[in-house]
Structures are given as C-alpha cells and as structure tokens.
Image (tube, rainbow, N blue to C red):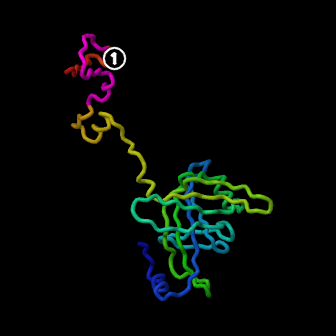
C-alpha cells in the first residue's frame, strides 16, 4: 500500500483536483572515470529543484521526458517492468546516453502533486518505483518525427532472481564453517567409477590427479 505525506493525504481526502507529474532519477556510471553520476528528468515545464529525503535534486523538464507508461501497483515478488520515453535530442538526455553507462543503473521514480491553479507543490514527492535500467533503445525518427530514447526499467524485485555467488565446493562450505566436511571429496567425485547392478573384474582407470581413488562396485 502506498503511503502519502500528511499534506497530500489531506488534499486527496478532500477530493480536490490535483496536477500530477512524474520524476525520474538515474544514477549511472561515467564511461571515462567510472564515477557514479546522477541526473533527473520530469514531465513538467522548465528545470525545477525538488527535495527528496532531505536532499535537493535538480530535475530537467521542458520536453526532456516525453512520456511514462501507466504505473501499475503490484504486490508480492513480481518483477515489474516500466517504460519511460525521453527526447534523445535534448542536451541533458544526450549527455546521459553518450557519456554515462546507464546499463543496470539504479533508478527512482516519484510522483509530485501540484495545485492546478497556483502551480504550487503540495508536499514532498512520493516515491512510486525503485529499480534499475534494464535496457535503452534509441528510436530513429521518421521525417518530421521525434528522435526518442526508450528506457525499460525493472523493479527492485529483480534482485531476488540473482544466483548465489557460492559454488558446490569444499572450500565454500569451509569458509562458512571450518568443520563442515560435507563436500570434502567433491573435487575427486568425477574420478570415482561406479558399477551399478553389474560385475566387473577390470579395475577402473584412476585419475593421475587423484591417487588412491578406487572404483566402487555396487553389483547385486
């Protein structure tokens, strides 16, 4: 369930018409220095500063961010996908695409609520999406069309699909517990020959790297 600030909740409860804007914040890696750099875009007018978690951020507007697919709230461990369309010819967007490596860059999306008459921000923006950039597609425009870039974002639930870094080895188990010898002979398991349900009189070849390993006969 989404949590709103007291100021926004009061206005929503009063069923007052509000103007909503989407804010996108990307923390990408500089291709030259490797340093993490952040940039923000929003589908509002001009450039505007917003305070997010006590930190002031500058978000570029005026056409940099062209559109956002409808954001659907999901529950559980579902990996949510989200598309954001940017103007690829805007200088700030072009810089973000060419100078920074946005692949798997952390992203945040917030929703800002404004008074439709005064254009004043009601309260601090509400976070609605957290995740990473999955891919970036540059769409070359037709004649008289818009040159755009489409970001495909995936939610933070993607982290739960990562494989464990450990392997099935004696060394990995002993790093966790020095007395865990469950996989003590894992490294020579492939050198041991098993005979299931048959009789053999010919000794199996023993790997030079595994001296002393003898075949095991499980003949009935």
- Above or below: residue 42 compared with residue 154: below
In the picture, the quarter occupied by the C terminus is: top left
Quarter of the rendering containing residue 17: bottom right
Residue 46: percent from left, percent from top: 67, 73
The mark tally for this picture is 1
- Above or below: residue 48 compared with residue 32: below
Residue 153: percent from left, percent from top: 54, 58
Quarter of the rendering containing residue 165: top left
Residue depicted at x 60% and y 63%: 84
Residue depicted at x 27% and y 28%: 185
Q: Nearer the viewer, residue 67 or 124?
A: 67
Residue at the top extreme, as displayed: 202
Residue at the left extreme, as displayed: 220
Q: Is residue 82 left or right of residue 180?
A: right
- Above or below: residue 107 compared with residue 187: below
Residue depicted at x 32% and y 34%: 169
Quarter of the rendering containing residue 86: bottom right
Magenta region, residue range: 184-204
Residue underneath mark 1: 207
Residue depicted at x 61% and y 66%: 41
- Above or below: residue 203 compared with residue 174: above
Which SS class for mark 1?
Answer: loop
Q: Is residue 73 magenta?
A: no
Residue 134: percent from left, percent from top: 55, 53
In the picture, the quarter occupied by the N terminus is: bottom left
Q: Is residue 203 magenta?
A: yes
Residue 4: percent from left, percent from top: 45, 77
């Amino acid at each position: 369930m989404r949590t709103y600030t007291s100021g926004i909740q009061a206005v929503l409860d009063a069923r007052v018409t509000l103007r909503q804007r989407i804010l996108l914040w990307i923390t990408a890696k500089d291709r030259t220095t490797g340093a993490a750099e952040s940039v923000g875009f929003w589908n509002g007018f001009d450039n505007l500063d917003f305070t997010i978690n006590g930190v002031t951020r500058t978000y570029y507007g005026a056409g940099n961010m062209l559109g956002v697919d409808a954001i659907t709230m999901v529950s559980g461990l579902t990996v949510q996908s989200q598309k954001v369309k940017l103007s690829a010819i805007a200088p700030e967007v072009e810089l973000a695409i060419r100078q920074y490596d946005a692949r798997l860059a952390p992203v945040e999306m917030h929703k800002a609520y404004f008074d439709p008459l005064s254009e004043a921000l009601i309260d601090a923006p509400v976070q609605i999406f957290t995740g990473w950039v999955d891919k970036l597609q540059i769409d070359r425009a037709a004649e008289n069309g818009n040159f755009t870039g489409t970001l495909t974002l995936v939610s933070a639930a993607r982290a739960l699909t990562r494989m464990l870094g450990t392997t099935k080895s004696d060394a990995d188990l002993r790093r966790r517990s020095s007395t865990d010898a469950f996989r003590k002979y894992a490294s020579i398991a492939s050198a041991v020959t098993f005979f299931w349900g048959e009789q053999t009189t010919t000794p199996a070849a023993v790997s030079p790297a595994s001296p002393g390993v003898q075949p095991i006969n499980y003949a009935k």
